[in-house]
Image (tube, grey):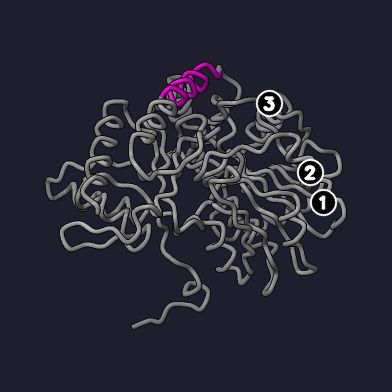
Amino acid sequence: MLSTSIALNRVTESATLKMATLSRELAAKGVNIISLSLGEPDFSSPDHIHQAAIDAIKTGKFDSYSPVTGYLDLRQAICTKLLRDNNLEYKPENIVVSTGAKHSLFNIFSAFINPGDEVIIPGPFWVSYPEQIKYCDGIPVYIKTTVADNFKMSAAQLEAAITPKTKFLVYSSPCNPTGAVYTKDELAAFVAVLEKYPHVHVVSDEIYEFLNYEGKHVSIAEFPSMKDRTIVVNGQAKGFAMTGWRIGYIAAPAYIAKACEKLQGQVTSGTNSVAQRATIAALTGSLEPTYKMREAFKIRRKMVYDLMLEIPGFKCTMPEGAFYLFPDISYYFGKSYNGQTIENAEDFAMYLLNEGHVAAVSGDGFGAPECIRFSYAASEANLVEAFTRIKNACAKLV
């Protein structure tokens, strides 16, 4: 039997995908599972995006390999989008299109992390950040935040975490899993710190940009001193309901884009040609479907937050973006039902799955073992039923 590599052995299984697998296995056995585990819009991609893909297929012009960094007109469309929405000026040479934002992140870390390099990650964080960093033999440096501070890192915490070995700060705003959004003033405070440490670069994950319910999205790359030290990561999955199309991209200084292109050329080459044509339509066409989806999520956000407040012991802030609730459920640690004692969030998630038939994700993989993540990217009827089940299951724990 082959032994796995040292690099792979540093990585743990994705917590979100693990729970999705478990819930599917139960559903296959006939159990009525309501899944609130995956971060995937329950909307279809807009019609004009579908049509662009159909048209591309019919022409027969896109059956061949695509350029490693993406079609030139797609990269131009991304530049137009970044100027329009983010006041960021880039050229096509600054853009690399990849097979999803997760792939974009892996390109960055693989191209630039050396053994022993440190990467600051404010927690809670998306599950793949530390695992990709560890795979590349880097060292994740975690900054702890809690529900009491709205799951937001402070400038003082950031400065305390920086060392001569720090290569990157990586964060998402809006945040997966908390829904926290950094304001322009909060980002300005980070910039004031980072200006003192020019060796630190920023990976700004903005995949939830269009799902911001409280104000205009702000990128740290908009600050003049940070433009050449920031790698903006974005993609189509969340804001355009295009998770299956697998299109992500970076906007970065040309030398960083070139390094990612070099790596990608030896790993995947250019991403799906038809999906790229559809993405041009998404970025240059009407954003009305995106705005309607955001309004639907905003309504669900209030609904599920109110439902959650009816459950004793749950502590949570109103999320400002994305489509998750991330309550602290440590109130239930040590409580039992039918011989099962809840020792941690993993136990709680499995209890909800087996007793309440609701799939959620333990906060362990997000760096918050006292919390659990619920996605409200589900129908209103399913959300009401799910939180009724959660409330009833919690009532049994004593």
Q: Secondary structure at mark 2?
A: helix
Disc 1 to disc 2, how far (Cα)? 7 Å
Q: Secondary structure at mark 1?
A: helix
- The residue at the far front in this view is 398
Pick the front one: 66 or 331: 331
Label 3 CA crowd tier, 10 Å (few <14, some 14–19, many 20+): few
Q: Is residue 213 above or below residue 388?
A: above
Q: Badges 1 and 2: C-beta atoms under 8 Å apart?
A: yes
Counting from the top left corner in percent of width and height, residue 372 is at 40, 49
Instruction: Magenta stretch: give its range.
Output: 287-299
Label drawn at residue 85: 3
Q: Is residue 272 above or below residue 297?
A: below
Kind of residue at badge 1:
Val
Q: Is residue 76 left or right of residue 371?
A: right
Kind of residue at badge 3:
Asp
Looking at marks 3 and 1 on the same chain, the residue that comes earlier in the sequence is marked by: 3
Disc 3 to disc 1, how far (Cα)? 26 Å
Label drawn at residue 109: none
Q: Is residue 323 left or right of residue 143?
A: left
Main SS type for the magenta part?
Answer: helix
Query: Which residue is label 1 attached to?
Result: 193
Q: Quadrant of the N terminus?
A: bottom left
Q: Residue at x 38, y 81 (%)?
A: 2
Q: Quadrant of residue 279?
A: top right
Pick the front one: 398 or 179: 398
Front of the two marks 3 and 2: 2
Query: Which residue is label 2 attached to?
Result: 189
Disc 3 to disc 2, how far (Cα)? 22 Å
Q: Is residue 305 left or right of residue 192?
A: left
Label 2 CA crowd tier, 10 Å (few <14, some 14–19, many 20+): some
Counting from the top left corner in percent of width and height, residue 226 is at 81, 45
